[in-house]
Image: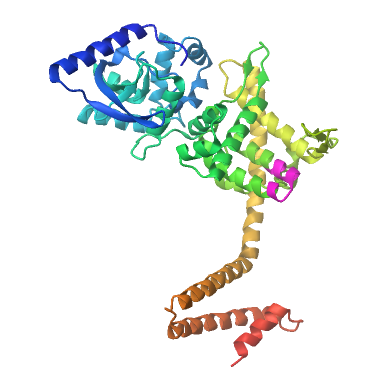
Amino acid sequence: MGQLPPNAAAVAQLIEQRLAARLEKTGEQRTLTVDFRGQPEILSVVSLPVDSLMLNPDTHRIRAQKSLDPVREKALEDDPYGEMAQGYLQHLLTRDPVNPENEDTSFKELRESLDEYGQEEPGIVTRAGVLINANTRCVALRELGKREILVAVLPSDAAEADTEAIELVLQLRKEHKRDYSFVNALLAVDDRVARGDDPTAIQKDFRMRAETYKRSIWILNLIRDAIDRSRVQLKDGTEVKMRLVDFETHQGKLEELHRAWSKLERSGQHDRANRLLEQRLLAIVMDKSKTDVRLIDEDFLKNHAAEVLPPGDFSPTTINVPGVPGGLQVAGPSSETQRVSMLTDSALKARAVRQTSTVATPDEVRISAAKLVELDSAIENGLTTAGKSARLKKTHDAPIQSLEDATEDLRAAISAIAGSKAARSFDPEELDSALQSFKRELTRLAQHVKPAVVGGELSEGVGWLFKAVTAS
């Protein structure tokens, strides 16, 4: 927010006039208390014309959506308080962040509430007339034909870091009705990281655990890397790429990807982890459902859709580890992982071209669309096969999984009995009744297992089961 609006001086003068007039008329000021530089700050509230104020070009609410229109995005960067930029902000604030072509239902509800009940809480504005809070309310009031908006006025020395902190605090209040979208929340965290803030302080402000904080950074880096890999230079020299907003609908899939990738990474299986990442990212780019993405493991393409993998073998690579005296090289991606990565790259680039049909030539769009159709068909066939395998595996593993769950329950029971005895609330008679039920089910288990193992040599576990139910 380095630039000032062209009407900044006039708005500052109007603010002073209205504050003075209200004080002279009533002898008091309405106030709003906010956190300002770590301390409560009492701000005076004043009514200002909605058309005199500027929407905040740095609001986190629509950060990811700015890239929807490259021409207006550039206007927003070059002249944030110009007519085109402000009109673009006003439009984005009314849109559904996941499906920007639709009006946001929460915006519609806000507008209806303002129309019926009026403005109950003031927004916050700088002395230059830039809204820090209540940008969406201002847009709704304009659409309703209202002329005035209540705003609390920040001190004249409020800096950009102050306004960002205030916006965040207000956004994270429990009573706030309109949350940041998935990607915009990631960007809000990233802004604090880029500013050099302590991770512990960031986690506290965003009310998130350390693991959630690390996951947020990992996902945003993955998204940015995917966007960078999607860059394509068209025949006319124009560069196109995917956008942050293209990942708004994939929160659950990306969070599950991080969990699965981390599990492999922690066990030292770096190449398998990266191969899994590439194939699930491919499925995400192809807009596959969360249940479909779960079916994809590190060998999905090799086992179920090998025909779409680039042909040939690639030499295993090595990676130089920076900052190690004398140099250190570690193994890079395997040939198989490189092939998968190339396929994901092709999908990212094809997606970038297809969704910029107003810029690309018909031939470029046709080639990209054909590539995506080919990939989609192969992945769908692979998912069908993988789904059958997963169902068979689930049926095969179900008995063992159930017994493992029962073992965990027994451990919990032992712990509970120990605690009950320590508290002198242990009841042997109730335990006896529960053990009788347990014995009956254990006997039934032995009856089901016996036909499958009769005539063969009994394992230690099965032999114990038979002895346990026949004893007494």
Question: x and y percent of residue 220 in the render?
Answer: 58, 33
Q: Residue furthest front?
A: 39
Question: x and y percent of residue 203 in the render?
Answer: 50, 39
Q: Main secondary structure of the magenta part?
A: helix
Magenta region, residue range: 265-276
170 on left or right of 313: left
Q: Residue at x 57, y 19 (%)?
A: 357
Q: Nearer the viewer, residue 318 or 442?
A: 318
Q: Is residue 271 magenta?
A: yes
Residue 296 vertical placement versus 36 (above, below): below
Residue 286 visible (yes or no): no
Q: Residue at x 84, y 37 (%)?
A: 316
Residue 255 vertical placement versus 151 (above, below): below
Question: x and y percent of residue 237 in the render?
Answer: 67, 11
Question: x and y percent of residue 49 in the render?
Answer: 26, 14
90 on left or right of 2: left
Residue 169 vertical placement versus 82 (above, below): below
Q: Nearer the viewer, residue 410 or 157?
A: 157
